[in-house]
Structure formats: C-alpha cells, structure tokens
Amino acid sequence: MSNLMNTYGRQPVAFVRGEGVWLWDENGRRYLDGLAGVAVNGLGHAHKKLVSAVCEQAGQLIHTSNIYQIRRQEQLAERLCAISGMERVFFCNSGCEANEAAIKLARLYGHGKGIAVPTIIVMEKSFHGRTMATLTATGNRKVQAGFEPLLTGFVRVPYNDLEAVRQVAGHNHDVVAVLVEPVEGEGGIRIPDPGYLQGLRDICDQQGWLLMLDEVQTGIGRTGSWFAYQHAGIAPDVMSLAKGLGSGVPIGACLARGAAADVFKPGNHGSTFGGNPLACAAGLATLQAMDEEKLLANAATVGELIVRRLRDKLSGVAGVMEIRGAGMLIGIELDRPCSVLVARALEAGLLINVTADSVVRLLPPLIMNQDEAIQLVDGLVPLILALLQEARP
Ligand SMILES: Cc1ncc(COP(=O)(O)O)c(C=O)c1O
C-alpha cells in the first residue's frame, strides 16, 4: 500500500528509463511502447533535442508568471497558429483545462449575443476530461456517476449523426457551440464518415455557432497531419490541445479564430502555471523535432503499416469486429471485453491499452519505425488470438 489516492488500477510495473520506443523497468527488463504515455510521448523517450531544450530552459528560467510577458509563450503561440490557421492561443496545463477554456469561451460568446443559457452540443461516447464541466460534456456515464449535480448548458446527440445536430438546431435557440472530437479516442477510436466534420462546419456557419474541436488526443501529428481536421479541409473556431504538445512536460492550449479569437478579455480566464517558459520550451522543441524528422509522414506511413498488418493477420477471425486507424491512432474492436490483454501484453513486453471495454488501442510514439511496428503487431496478434479462443466468461 502506498499513500497515493486510489484513483488508478495500476499495472504492477515501474519504469526507470526510456530510449526511443523502449522503456526499462526496475529489474532491467525492456518493453516496446505501443502507448506513448497515452498519446503524449510522440518523440518517444529521452529524445535528445527535447532533453537539451528542456535542460537549457530549466537552467535559464522555469517559471515567472502570466503577470509578465513570456517570450517562449509568444513563440509557441506563433508556431501553433502558423501550423493550424488559428489566431489566438491560451495556454494551460492539461487537456481538461484546455476544454474548460473552450467551454467558458463559448458561454461568454453566447452571453455576448444575448443568450441567457448558452448551450453546447456534445456527443455520445465522447471524452473531454474529468473536471466538472468536462465530465459533464463527456458522453460516458461511468465518468459522471457519483459526481452529480452535473452542469447545465449541454445537450447530447449521437456521434457521426448530422441529422441529430440539425434537429437540435431546429428547436433549441440557446445553442452557441458544438464540442466534438474529430476521432473519438477514449470512446473506442471511432472515426466518423468522411463528410461529418464538413457537415458540422456548415451547420455551425448557418447557425452562427462555434465549431470547437477537441484535438487533445488527435492533435500534434497523431493522425498523420498536425491536426485531424486538416484531413477534412475545414477549420474550427476553437481547438483544444494537450497530450503530445509538450512530449510529457505538462501543457495544454485552447486556440481560437475569427469570432472566437477575441472573446476573452483580461480577467476572464487564467492559470498560474499555464504557458510557463519550461513548458513552452518543451512545446517548441517538440514541434521543431517533428518538422525536422518528418514525423507527420512517419505517423501516416507506419500507422498504415500497422493497420494493414493487423488486418492481414486478424481480419475474418471470429471475434474481431473491426480494425480502425487514423495515422498512429489505432483500434482493434473485439466482440467481448478485453482489458485482460493489457496485463498479458505487459508480460509479453508490450505496452498497449484497452478502451471502451472491447477496443484494443495502440498509440505508438510517432518516431516508431517499420521494424518496431512489425514487432508490436507480431507480439500483440497471438495474444488477441489466444483471448478469442478462450471460453467467454
Ligand atoms: C479527447 C480528449 N480530451 C480531453 C482529455 C483530457 O485530457 P487531460 O487528461 O490532460 O485532462 C483527453 C484525455 O484522454 C482526451 O483524450
């Protein structure tokens, strides 16, 4: 027993060192990382450019305060706007905080239009975080149960269903925004139909709503482009980022554009740590290394290889429902709960994840090469086949 609060069902291993896509535990055993700290360590572990940028910044200045100007923050905001087409950035420390900022921005935007109860459309099976506002927005009762009363000001519709959104538009005049993941990550790597984001963009334009994309999991190269919406050829009004942005140094960001760009005024929102020099140096080094090492292209190619190889080996096997992938965001849906695979994979020296009970989730570091990807698939497939041959509980 440790003194930690009992919030996680942890695996019985502690890692002490990492290099590239590999981690070592306290006994010197090596593991292949197919999870990247849940979509965080895009550069893998102990990436030299990241380590030297963080060390150099730590030796100069770790933190001042948002009471003062922070050049590293301005530089990171400029770079993020250049790669995203957004115009303004608010920095915080995590994904839920980035979504909190988006929710507050949408409410302020609504009040500015004279709407007394600004309402945000959110999706079934979504995940946006565990603060009160973001767990209310989350479409998973397990995340919400016990924390009632939830917030008001949200209406929920099925994911990937434009007609449901149009129906809300027809009768609810309090709606100010749609908050949606371009691919539902925690919900089971659910990839919407090709026209979905474009359709949401059109509805938001017609209604004067903000399109707010939660790119916390999909952003920073995970799907093979900087941001998942870029595959759809649209732009959001608001976007939330975190996870991969700081390669493990905590940082989140809420980006805005157009009518959303200047909604916040001094005093509306803030964060003590948000966007401090250390976190922003990590963000800048992450984006620079991704550029220099062409990691967007790598995520696309190696992600495709993983999906192709999984399909070659598992398609048509009884119990395998679907294999889905968007770059290095990959899900294998089985017909039964499979969380036991996490421990079995660990025993086999592989780090993987299971989400939505029955979906094996792979989120490898974006630096993973083809040989390592083949090792990951070839290590995982026998575990899935063995599970599917067992009598169902
Ligand atoms: C899409 C999405 N939004 C928000 C979050 C919450 O991020 P954080 O855990 O950094 O608060 C997550 C975390 O898994 C996520 O996947």
Image (tube, grey):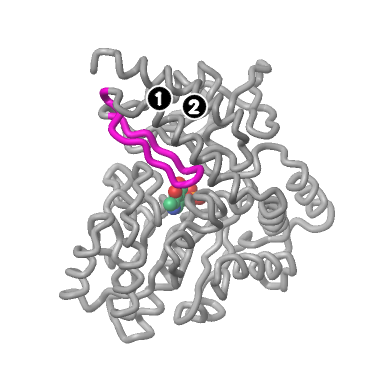
| Relative side of 158 to 269, left or right | left
Q: Position of residue 124 (x, y in %)?
A: 27, 52
Q: What's drawn in magenta, residue-wise?
A: 318-334
Residue located 30% across and 60% down the image = 122
Q: Choose mark 2 or mark 1, whichever is in front.
A: 1
Residue in front for this viewpoint, 213 or 305? 305
> Image point 74% across, 69% down: which residue?
71
Measuring from the top left, give residue 240's x and y in whole percent. Answer: 49, 61
Label 1 neighbour load within 10 Å: few <14, some 14-19, many 20+: some
Dot 1 falls on a residue whose secondary structure is helix
Q: Residue at x 48, y 30 (%)?
A: 352
What label does residue 313 carry, if any? 1
Residue 320 is a magenta residue: yes
On screen, 206 above or below 33? Answer: below
Which amino acid lies under the numbered mark 1 shown in the image of this protein?
Lys
State the CA–CA distance, disc 2 to disc 1.
9 Å
Is residue 358 depicted above or below 286 in this figure? above
On the rendered image, what quadrant is the C terminus found in?
A: top left
Q: Earlier in the sequence, mark 2 or mark 1?
A: 1
Query: Mark 2 sits on what residue?
Result: 377
